[in-house]
Image (tube, helix red, strand yellow):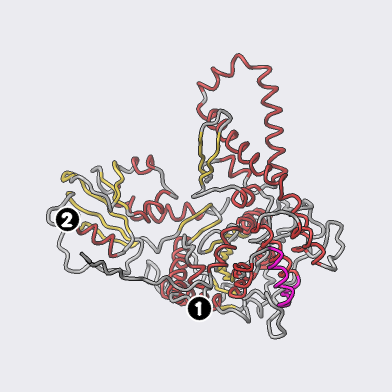
Amino acid sequence: VGFPDIMLCVVAGIQDTIIADCRKSEVWKILILDPFTTKLLSSCCKMSDLMAEKITIVEDLYKSREPVLEMKAIYFMTPSAESVQAFINDFKPKPKYKAAYVYFTDCKLLMNGTVFEVFTSKQIFSPLFFFSVKVFTCDNPGAFKSIYSPNSQDKKKTLETLADQLVTLCATLDEYPGVRYKKDNNMENAKILAELVDNKLARYFELDDSGKKKGKTQAQLLIVERGFDPVSPILHELTYQAMAYDLIDIQNDTYKYKSKDGAEKQAVLNEDDMLWVRLRHKHIAEVSKHFLKHFILLHISLQITINNLAQMMKKMPAFRKQLTEKTVHLQLAEDCMKHFSNNVEKLCKAEQDLAVGSDVEGVKVKDPMRTLLPVLLHPYSTHDKIRAVLLYIFSVNGTTDENLNKLIQHVKIEADREFILNWKELGVPIITSPSFFSRKPTRRDRSQEDTYNLSRWTPVIKDVMEEAVENKLDVKEWPHQSESPAAWNGSGAVSARQKHKPSSQDERRTGSRLIIFVIGGVTYSEMRCAYEVTQAVKSCEVIIGSSHILTPTGLVNDIKSLSKGPMEVFTIDERNNA
């Protein structure tokens, strides 16, 4: 007994529409996608899956294609003017295909005055991407600037879009959740988004398939601002996935590396890589132990079966795949450890002391500046020093103008002060002000938990997850926009700090879901927390998402760009001066 993965839910949504219609006909079809739906479909389907449903070719909507008049075409696209026009062009002046099945990610754009044979036109949903089975993303990194920049011109539109995507998630999961948000005296984005989502959910679930009004399900949606926890996205994390994306240049989840013979290679880090799935949330020390154990066993095996190994590998493709995965992750772990040995290990102690407020022995840090100074005096990179300065400022809940100027001079970013100053746009205190509302949350006691000395910080969102599943969130801090059933957390909820013991509680799983949306980006460490709490609390599945996924470098650069004005458009008048 378990919870259905959100990836499977979105696949089910596509199966109920596109694939279900395909099955009604025995004729082979062509699938035509725009760039957005290509990415969406590739996140949850393989070509072999499509072939099994009699889809023979996948084509790009925007590229020139030869007519295939004997075949029917399936169009899956966003309802943009460009996509619709490209679709129309396929049937004017002459049709390229025998017929068209048309599907939109949503139906906000209508087509008028176009004459061609359309067998069906359906709405799928507002687009969402599922990074992993507990993580979703709106794939909109630009939302950060749209929401938090003082010069933004499309903040309202962006929040509306995010609300639509959250409704898509709930509809995909068939959940009508109660909605709550983190109250913030300095920011109102969470409150606004909660109102938008709740209103849109009410309209969406007004009538179900049987014509009856759908009631709230046993789920909760919590909405929180990025400034709620500014520490987690800045720290150097030492769990495998977070560490890799922070220290290694991984683009589009693709890790590029050189093999031992110098050849350029690359590997995609996704759910298909089972070793990655098994190791990504483990501490780098545990990852290293895994490979050490593996190669000791491999060495023993080679001594015994060296003559049979080549024949065995020829007969076992799965074994070869496993060996390839191990090679990739051995290289990736090695790259991470090089960075750790060079700089990160020394940085981590200072960062953890500043973040936690005490040292390894539990002694309170009385003078955070004494912790920060060695970092500023060491030849670390500018970005690493900026991160340390920010952690210092967060630890003291804002500093003075005079002290900030000295810190900026130490880091030598006089011309780029926005790296630090622009955090105020997220409601994070940078300069001490009596009128500024104190933001430091009360933390759960984790003194009895086993932790590595350089990984003592726990993301604040994990406290929220645990408090939520135990039904202990403060109503004043987390107001209800709308409430879910009173028995939401079930009688089987336990603290995620406790080791779960199998009992009769396991047999009474309610299937409750806790959905958390972080405005302004979610970190890899926060994503890990969703897995940890779901594993520990058997009565509730935790799902977390955001507009996009953060890396420390990406966030720091985005913060700096907040003060830039909107891009101006110039018209260049070219004239012949001859």
Q: Whole-percent x and y of residue 368? A: 80, 66
Residue 353 drawn above or below residue 70: below
Is any part of residue 279 visible from this angle?
yes
Q: Quadrant of the C terminus?
A: bottom left
From the image, tell me which residue sits under label 1: 195
Up the image or down, 336 lies above or below 87; here it is above
Q: Looking at the picture, which amino acid does disc 2 mark? A: Phe
Left or right: residue 180 versus residue 470 is left
Nearest the viewer among 225 and 490 is 225
Residue 208, x across and y down, in percent: 40, 69
Q: Residue at x 65, y 39 (%)?
A: 334
Q: Which residues are magenta?
A: 396-411
Which of 565/498 is in front? 565
Q: Position of residue 20 (x, y in %)?
A: 33, 51
Residues under labels 1 and 2: Cα distance? 43 Å
User: Which quadrant of the figure has residue 325?
Assistant: top right
Judging from the image, what secondary structure is the residue with disc 2 in? Answer: loop
